[in-house]
Amino acid sequence: MTPAELSEIYRCYIDCLNRQDWANLGKFVHEEAEHNGKQVGLSGYRQMLERDFREIPDLRFNIGLLIAEPPHIAAKLEFDCTPKGEFFGLPINGRRVQFDENVFYRFEDGKVRQVWSVIDRKSVEDQL
């Protein structure tokens, strides 16, 4: 797979998330997916995303930076949203916050197999 092909798969994956097209998530996420070292599988990955969208109704994944070196993707995702209630244990309660997520993926068989994610919690704290 070329870097351009992997980048296109990733962009389609992000589009799937933004559309909350859970029925097609398995086209992009491996059955044995891992998130930050924890085996969650496709079903656990989907549950995590569904929870995120429930807690952040206006959640949208925006690619700020994307680097593809098959089988890996490195991305900076940018968020501008209004979480309900608490977010990272912080009382957001519907206030608008902006933050980034730095995330690395390893693809296997054209699907996300491993994810390592770090969210900039400090920038959220600084906005409160």
Image (tube, helix red, strand yellow):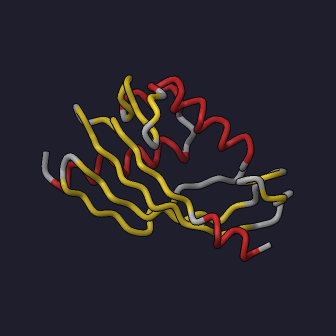
Which residue is more in the foreground, 84 or 32? 32
Which residue is more in the foreground, 90 or 105? 90
> Looking at the image, which residue is at 44% across and 62% down?
63
Which residue is more in the foreground, 126 or 70? 126
Q: Residue furthest front?
A: 37
> Looking at the image, which residue is at 46% across and 34% down?
38
Measuring from the top left, give residue 88's x and y in whole percent: 71, 54
Screen quadrant of the C terminus? bottom right
Measuring from the top left, give residue 83's x and y in whole percent: 76, 55
Q: Quadrant of residue 91?
A: bottom right
Give the answer, above or below, for where 121 lies relative to 53. Answer: below
> Looking at the image, which residue is at 55% across and 59% down?
119
Q: Is residue 2 left or right of residue 83?
A: left
Which residue is more in the foreground, 86 or 64? 86
Q: Is residue 113 left or right of residue 61?
A: left
Measuring from the top left, give residue 117's x and y in whole percent: 47, 52
